[in-house]
Every structure is written in C-alpha cells, then in structure tokens.
Image (spheres, rainbow, N blue to C red):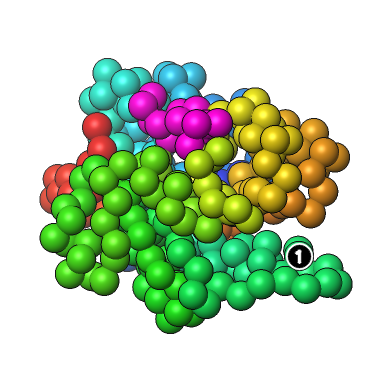
Amino acid sequence: MAKVLVATDKPFAKAAVDGIKTIVDGAGFELALLEKYTDVNDFYAAVADVDALIVRSDKVTKEVIEAAKNLKIVVRAGAGYDNLDLEACTAKNIVAMNTPGQNSNAVAELAIGMMIFMARNAFNPGTGSELKGKKLGIHAYGNVGRMVANIAKGFGMEVYAFDPFVTEEQMEKEGIHFCRTAEDLYSTCAYVSLHIPATEKTKNSINYDLLSKMPKGGCLINTARKEVINEAELVKVLEERTDLKYATDIAASNQAELNEKFCTRVFATSKKMGAETAEANINAGLAAAKQIVSFLNDGVTKFKVN
Ligand code: 3PG
C-alpha cells in the first residue's frame, strides 16, 4: 500500500487535512502526518518509507531526498517551488510538482490588505490616503498578479503590469496598461506589488536602481519572496527617500534593522500568511493529494516542474 506523508512546519487547516485524508484513503493509500516539526531529523525519519510527499514552504533538500528511499513524487501545495531541490529530485527520478493558482486569491487579498494598511498609516491616528485613482504596478502578471489587478480595479486603481512572458495585446485585452520594462513600471506606479518567483535570475533583483525610480510616496508590497529584494540597497533607498514605504509578508533578514530605522514606513507580518486561509489550504492541499493519486495510479504528470 502506497504511503503519503504530509510534512508541514506550518500546518494546513484541519478541514484541509481531513480532505486530504479522504482522497488518500479513497485511493486505498495510507496517510502519515508530520506537523509543526522543529527538528529536521524528524522530517528525515518521517520520509524514510513514504512513496509520496506533500509540503508547503518546507525545504525539501538533498538530505531529505537521500533519506526518502521510496519517494516517487513530491508536491509543493502552493505556487513557488524554490523550496524543492529539483536537481536532487531529478537525480533520483522523483517527480516534483506544484499546485499553481490554488492559493492565489488568498495572497492577492493580503496584498490589497497591506496596501490599505500602509495607505492608512499602519492603522495609527493621522491622515492617510486612498487607493482610488492611484497607479498600481503588478510586477509579474501571473495567477496572483492577475487577481490583485482585478481587485484593485474594483477599488478604482489604474493598473499597470510588467511581465516579459505576457504580451501587450493580452494585457490590454484585460484592461491593464502594458509596461515594456521593470523600470517603466517602477517609475510610473505609486504602489508596486511583487509577484515574481525566486530564481537565480530574480534574486536580489529589486534593487536601489528600481526602487529609487518610484514616484513620491511610493510603496512596495512584497507577498512573493524575501530573496528577490536586495536588502542592503532597500535600506539605502529608504534612508535617502524618506517618502518611500515597504510592506512584506516575508520578513527581511534585516527586518529588526528596518523596523528600528523606518518605524511605520515598513511592515512585516510575524509569520508568512499570504496563503493562510482555510480556503487556500483546502484548495492547495486537496489539489496536491489528487495529483499524487493521479500520478501513482495513472502516471499523470500534469504540473510537473522538473
Ligand atoms: C506559495 O508559493 O504558494 C506561497 O508562498 C505559500 O506558501 P506557504 O504554503 O508556505 O504558506
């Protein structure tokens, strides 16, 4: 009987775990759970005899892959799979997948919530501003970016986007102003919402050059990954431009320094919470379980990323 492990440092909502169990039991497989683990050795021990693995942002390193002698498939229940060592998976013939789009709405709603929070002085007394009529730049027009754009249009924002993989024609059809370069986006928009993945190419790419181009009062919202920010240059630009703001769902490595230096001009959630809704947990968790069943039973490799 195939064994499926759900290993989540940040557990799914109970309804999602129940739904995963129903799918796994229904396929005649066995489900094992490892939640809120604090010692990576517990992860190594738990994967030792499993055929399939579901994770969230949990790091599936070479060591995890080495420890997982029977592993055939790992599914990252979510969009970004920078936490999976794809090379190690491929070397052992293990299929790696994500569940694109399943938690996007939760992240998009958080991005908009953070914009309101920053526009209203981090909910402190004093005069804030409105989103209506402001220019919003979507940096990467994928699943989350599109949803942020749609909600923002409802707020009366003027939406721009930069994405080298989406054509001008497509964006215009969807009522989005096309930006040819990231520089265009940052120099045009009062708010920029980041939705790029963390890859070798994008790491540290949000730097002084880009941020210093933002219009007066500009605010960067990061619900993507901290690795895409050049943190030293972020400090430099916030020092020089006392009008700029930064809100993130992934605390920077130097967050304590940022908080001390820039007070309410910066904000970080205490633990990454973009996908922390019951709906997103259910959508992504159940999709992961279904993908595993389809793969183990029928060899379906849709959403394979390696
Ligand atoms: C994703 O890439 O899907 C999000 O960053 C969600 O991450 P999480 O599952 O750790 O909340």
Quarter of the rendering containing residue 128: bottom right
Q: Toward the viewer: 161 or 41?
A: 161
Quarter of the rendering containing residue 175: bottom left
Image location of residue 139, percent across then percent down:
39, 49
Task: Quarter of the image for the C terminus: give it.
Answer: top left
Predominant secondary structure, magenta span: loop
Position of 139 with respect to 265 (left or right) is left
Q: Which residue is mark 1?
A: 121
The amino acid sitting under disc 1 is Asn
**As drawn, 1 above or below 120:** above
Query: Magenta segment: does it hold 206?
Result: yes
Residue beneath the point at 48% across and 19% down? 63
Query: Magenta segment: does it hold 20?
Result: no
Q: Toward the viewer: 268 or 160?
A: 160
Q: Toward the viewer: 132 or 167?
A: 132
The answer to whether the beta carbon of the residue marked 1 is less than 8 Å from any atom of ligand 1 is no
**As drawn, 122 above or below 233:** below
Image location of residue 30, percent across then percent down:
40, 51
Position of 201 with respect to 60 (left or right) is left
Quarter of the rendering containing residue 19: bottom left
Q: Toward the viewer: 174 or 54?
A: 174
Q: Is residue 83 visible?
A: no
Q: Secondary structure at mark 1?
A: helix
Instruction: Please give the range of residues in magenta.
Output: 198-210
Q: Is residue 166 visible?
A: yes
**As drawn, 202 above or below 151:** above
Residue beneath the point at 65% across and 26% down? 232
